[in-house]
Amino acid sequence: MSIKRDLPVERPDAAALQVFLSACGEAPLAGTGETWLGYYRLPTTAGRRLIRLFDSDDDRAAAAARLDCLGEAGIPCPQPIADACDAASHRLGGQAALLLTCPPGMTAADYTSARCAALGGLLAQSHRAGEVCASVQAGVRTVREWRETAAALAPGLPREEAVLLLDEVRFQGLFRFGDLPQGLVHGNVTRDSALFEGERASGILGLEDGRPDAWLRDLASAADACCGHGDGSLDGERTQTLLQAYHGQRPLTPIERGAWPVMLRAVALQRWVEALQAGSASAADACARLRDRIAHESELQRYWP
């Protein structure tokens, strides 16, 4: 399942940017704007800001409501800047847009056990807060969509990889995650989703794309992205640290433990498919991670609090 982000790929037109910011009583500072982690980041006269573009005004309004709700619950995510803004702040160069605060901190090049714990705790907090932020739109792929995607990709793959792809899609089709604890999820946790000050998690990015799903998917996504070795295998200590920190704030259930190995495979499949669709050089690594999850499925339940 792909998370679609319609984003600026270069500095917005200077005149349009001036109009957009002036609608909120701000102005850009010269020379230092940049695309950054799916946003356009720039300093303004009021502080460091993020700009996010959307397909439609409805998508923009839903994202703003979601971020407002999470922010009110204490989640350190980007916040829409609304005070003193007029309708001109809703569009940038003709496209629906949000002007957002930028949480402090930096992305982590290396995920230590302490950072894995901080990420686990932050995800638990966002899941608990998300129980009241119900204005979200479903975005989970159906089994039929997975099968159609796999059938389209398989002819362009080496035979062994094509067989793996089709077999794994069939395997995932045997399972339903609707009985797992559900709520608002991030949906695509990567190494760049969290910001840190030292080893303390100071912010989380991407929650404007949140959707309803099994909370376990976020944990599997975080483990896949942040708790692995270079060969694609999971590091048991960091994975358990992630889960233990999460469990301390939102207790995991026996049914989630049973689904854990399958969900890890589902996330690995998702990332391989996305890499194949994008023609990314990371597809080989993503394929290796899926093979590892399959080969070690019986061991994965040991990585549990």
Image (cartoon, grey):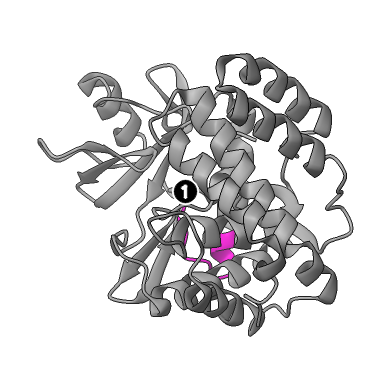
| Image-based side of 108 in relation to 136, left or right | left
218 or 75: nearer the eye?
Answer: 218
Task: Please identify the quarter of the rendering in which residue 58 is found.
Answer: top right
Residue 161 vertical position relative to residue 300 in the rendered view, above or below: above
28 or 122: nearer the eye?
Answer: 122
Q: Is disc 1 surrounded by few (<14), some (14 to 19) or many (20+) residues within 10 Å? A: many
| Image-based side of 3 in relation to 42, left or right | right
| Location of mark 1 (residue) | 80
Specify the amino acid type for callout 1: Pro
Tell me which segment is drawn in magenta: 70-79
What residue sits 88% from the left and 44% below the top?
Answer: 174
**Which quadrant holds the C terminus?**
bottom right
| Image-based side of 10 in relation to 171, left or right | left
Residue 115 lies within the magenta run: no
Percent x, y of residue 10: 26, 25
15 or 56: nearer the eye?
Answer: 56
Q: Determine the main secondary structure of the stretch shown in magenta.
A: loop
Percent x, y of residue 211: 69, 46
Residue 8 vertical position relative to residue 251 in the rendered view, above or below: above
Q: Secondary structure at mark 1?
A: loop
Task: Please identify the quarter of the rendering in which residue 39 is found.
Answer: top left
Percent x, y of residue 180: 83, 61
What residue sits 42% from the left and 33% below the top?
Answer: 89
**Which quadrant holds the N terminus?**
top right
Residue 127 appears in the rendering: yes
250 or 255: nearer the eye?
Answer: 255
Residue 69 appears in the rendering: no
What residue sits 41% from the left and 78% below the top?
Answer: 113
Give the residue furthest to the front: 160
